[in-house]
Image (cartoon, helix red, strand yellow):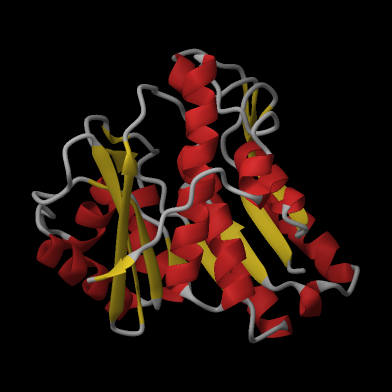
Amino acid sequence: MPSILSIQSWVAYGHVGNASAIFPLQRLGAEVWGVHTVQFSNHTGYGAWRGQVFGAELIRDCVQGIEERGVLPRCDAVLSGYMGSAEIGAAILDAARRVKAANPQALWCCDPVIGDVGRGIFVRPGIPEFLRDEALPAADIATPNQFELEWLTGGEVTTLEDAKAAVAALQARGPRCVLVTSLRLTDTPEGEIGMLAGEGGRFWRLSTPMLPLSVNGAGDAIAALFLFHRLRSGSAADALAAAASSVFGLLRRTAEAGSREILTVAAQEEFVAPSRLFAPETC
């Protein structure tokens, strides 16, 4: 099973960032080395929170300490999400380079957290540009949502052809494998939400029912699950199917419970054996 260095935010209450990514990976058998970019009481979706954004030197120090244990050659992947600041982003980029120097086969999965449809950009100034100009060119896998895909490639995405062209444009800048985690296109069936994966000039899509809930952290979970299954299978299509099926099950359980937080622990069997399977189609 893989060893993954996950550098993301952390919350004491709830499940976003590393608090959404680490447990599903561990439940599937991965060894996860978690380094936290922030320590908040809860996610910012509540409108109020306490805690701190950590300095870039703390990130560098933690990664150096891991390196000094001599274990980077067996690190299979780096997973990154919410960065907190562009300086932290530079520390994550340095961490990915250190891992790749020790293990050239290692992958960097960069979730380019910038914003979302309806909310716009919600990260600090400098982060979107850092992701576009420095992080993604060095990444192997990217997992943007529709808003982030549009911002990163500079064009509107409304049709499948738009989406495929935008994914190809992003791949031309660096990441050879791209997963668009939420996609509403002109041909998306009513009441459903789509996903699109592209790698090696091929594309796969699927859609799942939209559920009556508004939660945070699902994108962090799907990026982690997609990375895990891509590492295990070597197939973007298989990783898309497995990640989408698990996250749908997680969100369905959360909706049924009426929970404000995703039920990462209570619904853990969905990571191992999803209750409903979704198959991607080539497009």
- Residue 67 in view, yes or no: yes
- Residue 58 in view, yes or no: no
Q: Is residue 135 left or right of residue 121?
A: right
Residue 192: percent from the left, percent from the top?
A: 26, 40
Q: Tell me: residue 282, above or below residue 9.
A: below
Q: Tell me: residue 214, above or below residue 136.
A: above
**Quarter placement of the C terminus:** bottom left
Q: Tell me: residue 118, above or below residue 87.
A: above
Which residue is nearer to you in this view: 266 or 56? 266
Residue 133: percent from the left, percent from the top?
A: 34, 66
Q: Is residue 7 left or right of residue 216?
A: right
Q: Residue at x 74, y 72 (%)?
A: 75
Q: Is residue 60 left or right of residue 189?
A: right
Residue 127: percent from the left, percent from the top?
A: 39, 49
Residue 21: percent from the left, percent from the top?
A: 62, 46
**Quarter placement of the N terminus:** bottom right
Which residue is nearer to you in this view: 281 or 79? 281
Q: How many marks?
A: 0
